[in-house]
Image (spheres, rainbow, N blue to C red):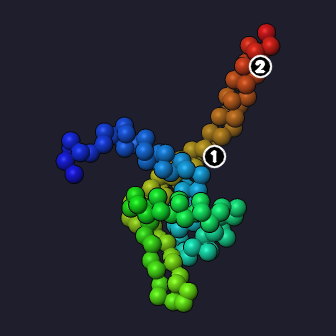
Amino acid sequence: MTDDERPGSCELVRSTMAMIGEKWSMQVLFELCNGPVRFNELRRLLTPVTQRMLSSSLRTLEHNGLITRTVHPTVPPQVAYALTEPGRALNAAIHHVALWAETYGDTILAARAGHETADAVRTTG
């Protein structure tokens, strides 16, 4: 891909953040961090995800090169998913974001509450 064909870095970051911000993507990545997991096991681990939503999330992650899909020739066929190297790296980055959220969660909640109170005063005042 040439530089002219490559999306701008802002667009690439935005599209990546949208992909991992999808409701089930981060959770799928976390569940795959210890090794391959079969589809039905993922579905159980991620209850209440629907089969359709899980399939969609898995397709998106596979399309973006973050996971691999392996079909085992059994009857019925068993499908397992695993992280790729970029998927493992992203999983590590998401882990850091999760730690940040835990560290600053109370600060964020307090700021939100302060703004909600200010908004309520402006609305009623």
**Which of marks 2 and 1 precedes in the sequence?**
1
Q: According to the image, label 1 marks what residue? A: 102
Tag 2: amino acid? Ala
| Residue 30 visible, this angle | no
SS class, disc 1: helix
Q: In which quarter of the image is residue 4?
A: top left
- Say which residue appears at 43% left-offset and 47% top-offset: 16
Q: Residue furthest bottom?
A: 75
Tag 1: amino acid? Glu
Q: Is residue 102 above or below residue 81?
A: above
| Residue 92 visible, this angle | yes
Q: Position of residue 27 (x, y in %)?
A: 58, 59
- Say which residue appears at 33% left-offset and 40% top-offset: 9
- Of residues 74 and 44, which is closer to you in this image? 74
Q: Position of residue 75 (x, y in %)?
A: 54, 90
The mark tally for this picture is 2
- Of residues 122 and 58, which is closer to you in this image? 58
Q: According to the image, label 2 marks what residue? A: 120
Q: Is residue 26 above or below residue 101?
A: below
Q: In this view, does 61 lie above or below 115?
A: below
Q: Quadrant of residue 63?
A: bottom left
Q: Position of residue 65 (x, y in %)?
A: 38, 61
Q: Is residue 38 left or right of residue 84?
A: right
Q: Where is residue 84 in the image (x, y as percent from the top left)?
A: 40, 66
- The quadrant of the picture occupied by the C terminus is top right
